[in-house]
């Protein structure tokens, strides 16, 4: 199995157990599932006594997105109110520009030539213009376990069916760790 980590923060972002679909040679889109987590009701075959009848355990089942839960991604904002950290495109672009500069530095440190760096920058700008910008209001933003907002911000949206969540991850911002 391969775990993909953010090249800047070192946070685990995704693994190859999910189907990573490359888009525009710059991002991976990964379909997620909503799953329910909670307290399991374990029946040990005993009847509750009259004294224990009022001590029912409160069910705390919660619906989560599998990848967000598995990789301990943290919502950037207030989930209760739905308020996002990046309220405007300008807010998000400031973070993205800083992150992209760090990715370019890492690419160069790892031996990428100028043509590869230029192709990445052009592809990233094109993807932002074509996909992220026009749909900005539909995205939720997540970061890895360390909560490092200088690291990769994972984008979460829903497919056209309105049911299937998917995440978008910057391909060049990942390193591989074989497990």
Image: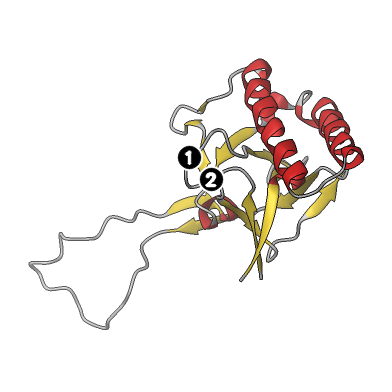
* Mark number, residue 144: 2
Please say if 126 is above or below 173.
above
Q: In the drawing, does residue 50 fall left or right of residue 10?
A: left
Point out the image quarter for the C terminus: bottom right
The residue identified by callout 1 is: 147
Q: State the residue in front, 14 or 37.
A: 14
> Which of the 4 image quarters holds residue 71?
bottom right
User: Where is residue 21 drawn, in percent x and y?
Assistant: 81, 53
Specify whether residue 125 is in view. Answer: yes
Q: Are marks 1 and 2 in contact (CB under 8 Å)?
A: yes
* Local secondary structure at mark 1: loop
144 relative to 58, above or below: above
Tag of residue 80: none
Quadrant containing the N terminus is bottom right
- 69 sits left or right of 104 in the view: left
- The residue lying at 77 percent from left, 24 percent from top is 133
Q: Residues within 10 Å of mark 2 (few under 14, many from 20)?
A: many
**Percent of width and height locating residue 65:** 57, 51
Image side of residue 179 versus residue 19, left or right? left
| Residue 164 in view here | no
In 3D space, how far apart are the residues under numbered discs 1 and 2 (Cα atoms)? 6 Å
Q: Which color scheme did the rendering employ for the protein?
A: secondary structure
């Amino acid at each position: 199995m391969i775990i993909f980590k953010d090249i800047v923060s070192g946070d685990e972002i995704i693994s190859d157990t999910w189907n990573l679909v490359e888009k525009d040679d710059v991002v991976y889109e990964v379909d997620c599932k909503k799953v329910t987590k909670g307290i399991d009701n374990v029946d040990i075959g005993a009847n509750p006594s009259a004294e224990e009848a009022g001590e029912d355990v409160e069910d705390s089942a919660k619906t989560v997105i599998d990848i967000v839960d598995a990789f301990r991604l943290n919502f950037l904002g207030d989930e209760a109110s739905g308020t996002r950290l990046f309220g405007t495109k300008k807010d998000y672009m400031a973070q993205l520009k800083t992150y992209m500069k760090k990715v370019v530095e890492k690419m160069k440190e790892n031996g990428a030539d100028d043509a590869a760096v230029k192709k990445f920058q052009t592809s990233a700008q094109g993807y932002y213009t074509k996909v992220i910008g026009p749909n900005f209001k539909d995205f939720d933003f997540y970061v890895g376990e360390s909560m490092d907002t200088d690291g990769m911000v994972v984008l979460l949206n829903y497919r056209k069916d309105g049911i299937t969540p998917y995440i978008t991850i910057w391909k060049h911002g990942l390193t591989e760790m074989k497990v």
